[in-house]
Image (cartoon, rainbow, N blue to C red):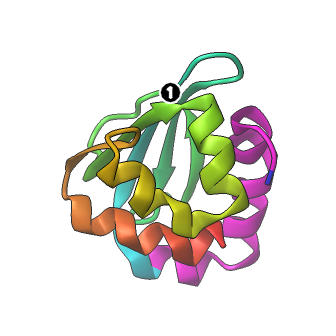
Amino acid sequence: MADAQTDFGTRLPQKIAANPDKAKAIGAVFLFKINGDGGGVWTVDCKNDVGVTTGDKGGADCTLELSADDWKTISDNPGAAMQLFFTGKLKVTGNAMLATKLQQILA
């Protein structure tokens, strides 16, 4: 994946559309707050109306906040999220255990 705008605007929606059952199996709504150049706010719904939408649609089970540069790191290597979390660069609120399921659609 590339930058956050491309990932959330094109790549991630394509991945979810190609395998909606895989996304639905996660059973959660995620809010991504990507700060800095190329960032934005996106809702990734893997529970109700499966897909990616721009903005905060409400009802997130898990919110992830990080910089655009750190998003690029996760985009290239989803396994890096844990290290970013433990170093405080990735802030997770809500049900943090759900964030571990994101690798299923990011990888």
Answer whether residue 4 is magenta in the image. yes
**Residue pointed to by mark 1:** 55
Three-letter amino acid code at the position of disc 1: Gly
Can residue 43 be spotted in the picture? yes
70 left or right of 43 in image: right
- Residue 83's quadrant in the figure? bottom left
- Identify which residue is drawn at 25% across, 53% down: 61
Answer whether residue 30 is magenta in the image. no
Residue stretch rendered in magenta on the structure: 2-24
Point out residue 102 in the picture as x, y percentages from the top left corner.
48, 67
Point out residue 100 in the picture as x, y percentages from the top left corner.
37, 70
Which residue sits furthest top?
37
Which image quarter holds the C terminus? bottom right
- Identify which residue is drawn at 64% across, 33% down: 69
- Identify which residue is drawn at 68% across, 79% down: 19
- Residue 3's quadrant in the figure? top right
